[in-house]
């Protein structure tokens, strides 16, 4: 899917890989004017609508339709968010209900890096999306580094181990259940979401 001034699906699950390839070929970066508002908004950037949270919510609802396999969202963006109808909390809630893991690739905007005092919280937003869903944030300082980030994501997915458990609370009430994974050996890293939603009857 493509998002910017709006959210557009270029490929629907479970379409063929040919359809996926065609969708990727249609991807384009929207050209939008950038301005630095004066007054109370000084220090913040205005690049027009950029519906990151709407995209996360709609993608989560789409992968929820999948009956099998792992549910992963790979988000390639600089983390800029503006004018989504969906809040960050609602976007994360949708991802957690879909049992989706979010991997973010932050493609650094070199122009923004040169603006002193600019309030650009994009990376912090992407880190939160990844951390809360058990994924990881990768940083590509230049666009050509993005393929390597995809390679690292693929390697991580192939080398992961999963731990399951049976909860003591067996009620199917749709409530959010907090979990915490701890390991005695500091040579290992655990990435896990902070909880999950119990199924409903």
Image: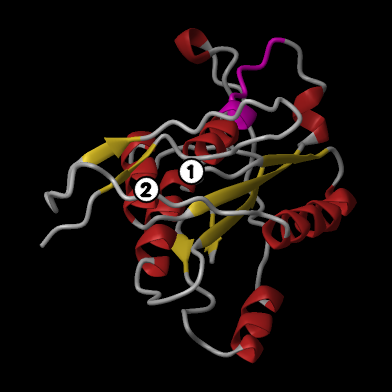
- The Cα atoms of the two marked residues, 2 and 1, are separated by 7 Å
**Residue at the disc numbered 1:** 133
Horizontal side of residue 186 vs 120, given as left or right = right
Q: Secondary structure at mark 1?
A: loop
Split into 4 quadrants, where in the image is the N terminus? bottom right
Residue at 71 percent across and 62 percent down: it is 158
Residue at 60 percent across and 13 percent down: it is 43
Split into 4 quadrants, where in the image is the C terminus? bottom left
**Residue at the disc numbered 2:** 96
Residue 27, position in %: x, y? 66, 69
Is-magenta flag for residue 102?
Answer: no
User: Residue 184 or 201: which is nearer the viewer?
Assistant: 184
Residues under numbered marks 2 and 1 in contact, where contact means CB atoms less than 8 Å apart: yes
Residue 181, position in %: x, y? 49, 33
Residue at 83 percent across and 58 percent down: it is 147
Horizontal side of residue 99 vs 79, given as left or right = left
Look at the picture and state if 31 lies above or below 176. Answer: below
| Dot 2 crowding, Cα within 10 Å, few <14, some 14–19, many 20+ | many
Span highlighted in magenta in the image: 117-124
Look at the picture and state if 8 lies above or below 198. Answer: below
Residue 10, position in %: x, y? 54, 75
Quarter of the image where one finds residue 159: bottom right
């Amino acid at each position: 899917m493509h998002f910017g001034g709006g959210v557009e699906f270029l490929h629907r699950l479970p379409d063929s890989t040919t359809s996926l390839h065609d969708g990727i070929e249609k991807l384009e970066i929207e050209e939008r004017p950038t301005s630095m508002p004066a007054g109370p908004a000084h220090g913040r950037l205005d690049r027009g609508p950029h519906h990151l949270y709407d995209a996360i919510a709609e993608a989560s609802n789409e992968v929820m339709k999948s009956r099998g396999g792992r549910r992963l969202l790979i988000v390639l963006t600089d983390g800029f968010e503006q004018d989504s109808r969906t809040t960050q909390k609602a976007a994360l809630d949708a991802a957690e209900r879909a049992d989706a893991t979010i991997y973010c690739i932050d493609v650094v905007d070199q122009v923004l890096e040169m603006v002193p005092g600019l309030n650009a919280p994009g990376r912090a937003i992407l880190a939160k999306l990844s951390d809360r869903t058990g994924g990881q944030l990768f940083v590509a300082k230049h666009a050509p580094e993005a393929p390597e980030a995809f390679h690292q994501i693929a390697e991580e997915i192939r080398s992961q181990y999963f731990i399951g458990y049976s909860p003591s609370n067996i009620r199917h009430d749709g409530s959010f259940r907090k979990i915490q994974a701890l390991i005695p050996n500091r040579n290992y890293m655990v990435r896990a979401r902070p909880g999950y939603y119990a199924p409903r009857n």
